[in-house]
Image (cartoon, rainbow, N blue to C red):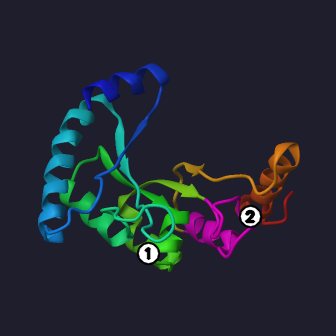
Amino acid sequence: MRDTIEVAKRVGARCILVTPGQLEAGVELSYQMVNAIENLRAAAKVVEPHGLTMLVEPLNPWVNHPGAFVTKSSQLFELVRGVDSPAFKMLFDIYHLQISEGNLIGNFDRCRSAIGYIQTGDVPGRNEPGTGEINYARVFEHIQRRGYTGVIGTEHNNSKPGKDGELAVIAAYRKVDVRAGATGS
């Protein structure tokens, strides 16, 4: 973690993504959760004095990450509350959470106090908003109404190659931009 802090300082990062890894076969989930909380709490104590935030994201077990330890917002919320550090927050990854559990708006509300970062990607395909089943205009409107002012990052592919794909991504975000009234203006 100390090496990661130095790299984060060099590149001007404010956040560090961490993962608790895979489920351990034959070990009760509750024991694994306690172990994760204790290890992340120790890491958070190292990170806190540097003004950085560690983020943990859920990884869906159905499409991309079979056997992942953290797959749902409730698990992330439990981790964040258990670690109990300003240097540890939840990465609310809309793509992974839609696959793992759905109910994005309800789960956002339940976890709001623990969220430090949001990532986008539509389902299926992990492309820009508007290429799948998620109603991003509605999700973004809700997130804004709830007062979230943090970063919303993009971690997805482009649905089309080259310049056409880049233009499609820009158009997609303009279409769901709450501040523009979802009109693209």
Going by the numbered disc 2, the residue's amino acid type is: Val
Q: Residue at x 47, y 71 (%)?
A: 62
- Could you tell me what secondary structure mostly forms the magenta stretch? loop
The magenta stretch is 121-145
The disc label shown at residue 143, or none: none
Q: Residue at x 21, y 54 (%)?
A: 84
**Location of residue 24 with respect to 85 vertically, above or below:** below
Q: Identify the mark nearer the N-term, 2 or 1.
A: 1
Q: Answer with left or right where residue 184 lies relative to residue 5.
A: right
Element on which disc 1 rests? helix
Please state the horizontal and vertical placement of residue 149, each as a whole percent of the image. 54, 53
Name the image quarter holding the C terminus. Answer: bottom right
Q: Is residue 130 magenta?
A: yes
Instruction: Write down the residue under mark 2.
Output: 176
Quadrant of residue 178 in the image? bottom right
Q: Residue at x 30, y 62 (%)?
A: 69
Q: Nearer the viewer, residue 131 or 112?
A: 131
Instruction: Write down the residue under mark 1.
Output: 107
